[in-house]
Structure formats: C-alpha cells, structure tokens
Image (tube, rainbow, N blue to C red):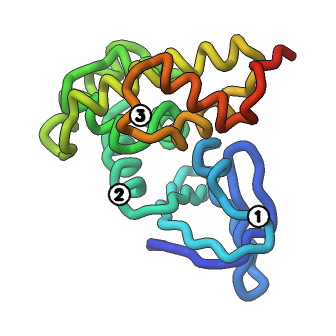
Amino acid sequence: MIYSVTGRLVAKGENFAVLEMNGLALKTFTNPRTVESLSAVGSTLKFFCHLHVKEDALELYGFKTEPELRFFELLISISGVGPKSALSIMEIAELKSLTAAIKEGRPDLLTRASGIGRKTAERIILELKNKVEVEKSEAAVKKMETDADLVETLVEFGYRRDQARAALEKVDEKIMNIEDRLKAALKSLGGGAPRRS
C-alpha cells in the first residue's frame, strides 16, 4: 500500500497534482483547496496518499498532512460516500471546522458540499461523531458558518470561489465579527474595492 510519495511537482489542475520521482509521474487527485495551497511547479512536494482500487482503475488520492488523509479515509469508510464525495466535503472548509461541524451535529454545514444530501450528511455525523476530536468546536462551527456566508458575498462581488476561500483562510481566527472578517479578506485580495466580472 502506498502511504506517501515525495517528488517534484510537474503539473497541477483544478483537482489533481502530478508528482515525478525517478522518471515515474503520478497523477494524484485532491481537492481544489489543496491545489490552491501548493507551491509552484518545479518544487518538491510530499503527499500522504490513499490508493483507491476500482474494477477498472487505480486512483491515487493525496493530502498535505496525515490528519487530512485519516479524515478522508474515515469519510470513505461510510456507505454512500466515495472518494469524489469525500473530496467535495473537504473542499468546503478546513479540517478543524469540518470535524467541529461533525462533533456539533450540523448536517446543514456538510450539505454545502456538492453531491452531499441531508441523509448522507446525517449518516456521516452519526458514524463519525465519536471518532473525531476537536477543541473549541462551537467557535470553529461559528467561524465555518460565517466564512461560508462571506465566500458567497465575495463571489457576488466578482471574486472566484477559490480566491474567496483562500483570502478568508489568511484572516486571523481571533477576528470573529463578520464585517471585520470581510474587510480583512478584501484587504488580502488586493485592498481595493470589490470588482465585478
């Protein structure tokens, strides 16, 4: 079983990265949030990996940290949640916020992931609630709610969804007020007035 790969980043797309090592290039699926955080093409990268075996394909899924890999594997252990759905869930928020949403029993936050309905979200919470740990889960859930609303606001202003999420992740967690978080995110996005496309 492949647990991790380290190689030179030779290409990246919306939901994958290609790592080359000793003449072998591996296409590793991940979520756009992770792709956005990767260094420039040509840099050295380590991914913690899950090899998903299907009847007609072998697919490699990669994550920057071991906790992300473990969370992904917990998600796909649940009936009805495949690798693509798991990546979709991991796209909506950082790991701390996702585990907090599960711990606090908030299926409404998980259904923001593409392809995840209410029943699947409730099943995820039921099966994982006692398997995940997070400190200050109420505060993390509040931040997740606020940031989800702010992403939509920034998209309405004309920013791309991935830009909006990346900007909000740079905002200090201690800034909880929604207006202050919006101002800080806009400053991170260039400091000017929001632009419409």
Query: Along the polypeptide, which appears first: circle 2 or circle 3?
Result: 2
Asked if the residue under mark 3 is in contact with the one under mark 1, i.e. CB atoms within 8 Å, the reply is no
Q: Position of residue 140 (x, y in %)?
A: 30, 33
Residue type at tag 2: Pro
Across and down, in percent, residue 179 comes to 50, 17
In the picture, the quarter occupied by the C terminus is top right
Pointers 2 and 1 in contact (C-beta within 8 Å): no
Relative height, residue 19 to residue 169 (above, below): below
Total labels: the figure holds 3
Which disc, if any, is residue 81? 3
1 shown above or below 30: below
Give neighbour class at mark 3: few <14, some 14-19, many 20+ (Cα, 10 Å). many
x and y percentages locating residue 148 in the rendered image: 49, 21
Find residue 130 and report its image quarter: top left
Label 2: which residue? 67
Comparing labels 2 and 3, the label whose residue is closer to the camera: 2
Q: What residue appears at the point 33 percent right and 22 percent down from the top-left corner?
A: 121
Instruction: Give amino acid for label 1.
Output: Ala
Q: Residue furthest left?
A: 130
Q: Mark 1 falls on what kind of element?
A: loop
Q: Nearer the viewer, mark 1 or mark 3?
A: 1
Q: Quadrant of the N terminus?
A: bottom left
Asked whether the viewer can see residue 162, the reply is no
Across and down, in percent, residue 69 comes to 41, 57
Q: Amino acid at mark 3?
A: Val
- Mark 2 lies on a secondary structure that is helix
Within-10-Å neighbours for mark 2: few <14, some 14–19, many 20+: few
